[in-house]
Image: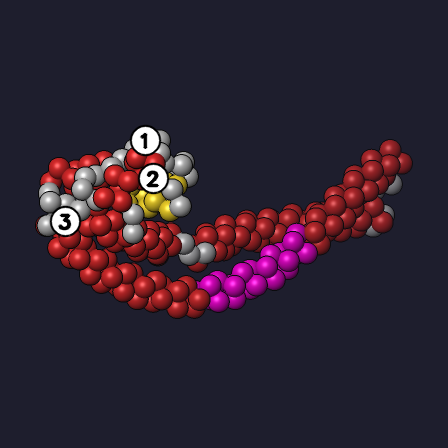
Amino acid sequence: MTTVRQMFALQELDIILDRVQNERTKAETELNNGDSVGMLESQLERDSERLQESETQRQTTRLEAETQKERSETLNTQLYGGEVSNPRDLESLEREANNVRQLVEKHENTLIEITVRIDDAHHKRSELESKLNEARAAWQIRQSELQAAIKALNEECSGFESQRSKLTEVLDPTSLQHYETLRKSKGGLAVAKVERGLCQGCRMSLPTHQQQSVRSGRQTVLCSSCGRILFLS
Ligand SMILES: [Zn+2]
């Protein structure tokens, strides 16, 4: 016959087993997706793409500025070379030369802005690269730690599992089924200790006759409040 003591021992083992399994799941989860390396890598990739775009933009602006500068020189030569003497032509030439000068200035300002942006981006990139190297080294260490921990937890688990099968072998199937069902529905606690007349599962005071039945140990007594199997150590 299954005694409450055996079920209590099984529960103690199951509590430990749950803890070990939880720890293992936590370690496995961290090992599978807990690193910051991937995040830094994609950030670096995004930043590099943006930097590439800025470099292209700088190249285009530089070419444009040079073209406009050449045009400005040509216009200046026409303007001061004495070839154009008609006042109206001179006036329109001057207006055009002014426009082009403004364009050159605008492009040069843009060039300065882009260059500052590129310098910043280079600086940020090298910072990110050294961060990434540090993260890679740290992750390598953490990975080995986690792998070792998982290995140890696996061994611990199999140890407890074989202890558990030895225990359940001697329990009668009906009691075991009752225990399993209660454990699932009662937050992992199927067997509750009785201390100072209180069920330690729900903290309710037990009627005297119930306490006496538990004490006699002749049958399985369930708490009248929470339904757990009562155990007097
Ligand atoms: Zn209770």
Structural distance between the alpha carbons of marks 1 and 2: 17 Å
| Whether residue 229 is visible | no
Residue at 87% x, 33% y is: 88
Along the viewing direction, whichever of 130 and 107 lies nearer the viewer: 130
Amino acid type of disc 3? Answer: Thr
Residue under label 3: 168
SS for dot 1: loop
Residue under label 1: 224
Work out which quarter of the rendered image holds the N terminus and state it.
top left
Q: Is mark 1 within 8 Å of ligand 1?
A: yes
Along the viewing direction, whichever of 58 and 190 lies nearer the viewer: 190
Amino acid type of disc 2? Answer: Gly
SS for dot 3: helix
Q: Which label's residue is closer to the chain start, 1 or 2?
A: 2
Residue at 39% x, 68% y is: 141
SS for dot 2: loop
The magenta-colored residue range is 114-136
Amino acid type of disc 1? Answer: Ser
Q: Residue furthest toward the right?
A: 87
Closer to the observer: label 1 or label 2? 1
Structural distance between the alpha carbons of marks 2 and 3: 20 Å
Rendering quarter of residue 139 = bottom left
Q: Is residue 133 magenta?
A: yes
Rendering quarter of residue 156 = bottom left
Residue under label 2: 187
Q: Is mark 3 within 8 Å of ligand 1?
A: no
- The location of residue 142, given as percent across then percent down, is 39, 65
| Whether residue 168 is visible | yes
Number of callouts: 3
